Image (cartoon, helix red, strand yellow):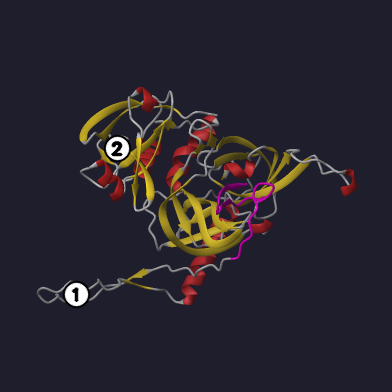
Amino acid sequence: MKARPGIWLVALGILAVALAGCTPCGLAAAVARQAPPASQPAAGLPAPLPEARSSLPNVGEQEQLLVDLYKRANPAVVNVQVTKRSQGSFRFDPQQGEPPDEFVHGQGSGFVIDRQGHIVTNHHVVEGAEEVLVVYADGDEARGEVIGSDADSDLAVIKADHLPAGVAPLELSDTDQVEVGQAAIAIGNPFGLQGTLTTGIVSAVGRTLPLGRESSSIGGRFSIPRMIQTDAAINPGNSGGPLLDSRGRVIGINTAINAQNGVNSGVGFAVPVSLIRRVVPRLIQEGRYVYPWLGISGRDVTPDIADAMNLPSRRGALIVEVVKSSPAERAGLRSCNRTVTAHDTELQVGGDVITAIDDQPVRQFDDLLVYLIENASVGQTIRLTIIRDGRPQVVPVTLAERPTD
């Protein structure tokens, strides 16, 4: 299941195709130490860079940190095996031998989130599954039922029929402030190899990828914001497994790799814990998650766009299209109405530029998406500060539910 050119979901078997081979980076857990007093720069000279305030532990300390973390976390990481009916989207030729089986199989990863036997995984791991088998780290097997799934966050919850004694749920990180450079540890079942640990770092944060559900209303896929990028090795079968910090807390759920022709280039992506904390409780309680919807597509304001539209600032979200019969259309928001050429590139301009939502600055289009997902709800009226024809104004918009087509 390929999400877009170069981005591959990483369930194994029926659900995705990807080959991989990235070398995991070493874990770099830091130990704080006292920094010496900084010398004052001479007048007129730039201040020197601050001296590093940490030192790396020795190899033995790194190893012990990982050994202890694995012993604590691995029992809660499971292998998710699914059976689904064949799509039958091929023509069988009797000369090719035996006809294909009616059912096909695939697998991914997941992790225990509470003592009631709820297991979090990816939507694309269990999508269309007619049977789910949960295999624990000690080999114990449980029947599973998908009780909730959300394509737009690529999250799903399985209820296992039992939880082995002594299995402790993984702890979700209590902070969204994942930092570039911090340790990233993945545990999962790449290529069906259960209980595999790989290490690396958080390479970037705040990535937005179009991995959600495809909708004809918007002419594309809904995006998942604030995804974590890591160089920890993530391969087919890792989908749904946890991405952990150095304390063993979940900071994300491994979901996709950036690949050319299915070959892992060492760039993996995880759905952030902030989305897990928001969506999973609703999936457990109601089986689905409802997203607020504005009904626009857009892009970041660039210097060329700002110059073409005489904007007072080079930051903001330009509305390129307004979806018909959407909250945005009902509120009177305007889309781009003309095209200009800048540096041999055609640019759509003339639409409203959003600069704030409920008085929170919108510097780029992702800011709008993050606010709607993390702070807004269906039926809520938000206040958009826009620039139209060079003048600022405030437009109230009552949000609806995302279309289900």
Q: Position of residue 47 (x, y in %)?
A: 18, 71
Q: Which residue is mark 2?
A: 354
Q: Which residue is mark 1?
A: 38
Q: State the residue in front, 5 or 65.
A: 5
Query: Would you say residue 266 sits in the magenta stretch?
Result: no
Residue 118 visible in rendering: no
Q: Identify which amino acid the numbered label 1 is placed on.
A: Ala
Number of labels in the image equals: 2
Q: Position of residue 382 (x, y in %)?
A: 31, 29
Q: Secondary structure at mark 2?
A: strand
Q: Is residue 269 above or below residue 61?
A: above
Q: Residue at x 50, y 54 (%)?
A: 269
Q: Which of the numbered marks, if any, corresponds to residue 93?
A: none
- Magenta-highlighted stretch: main secondary structure? loop
Q: Mark 2: give few (<14), some (14-19) or many (20+) Cα within 10 Å.
A: many
Is 362 displayed left or right of 298 in the figure?
Answer: left
Image quadrant of residue 204? bottom left
Q: State the residue in front, 281 or 266.
A: 266
Write the start and end of the magenta stretch as one range: 1-21
Alpha carbon of mark 1 to alpha carbon of mark 2: how far?
A: 44 Å
Q: Residue at x 33, y 41 (%)?
A: 317
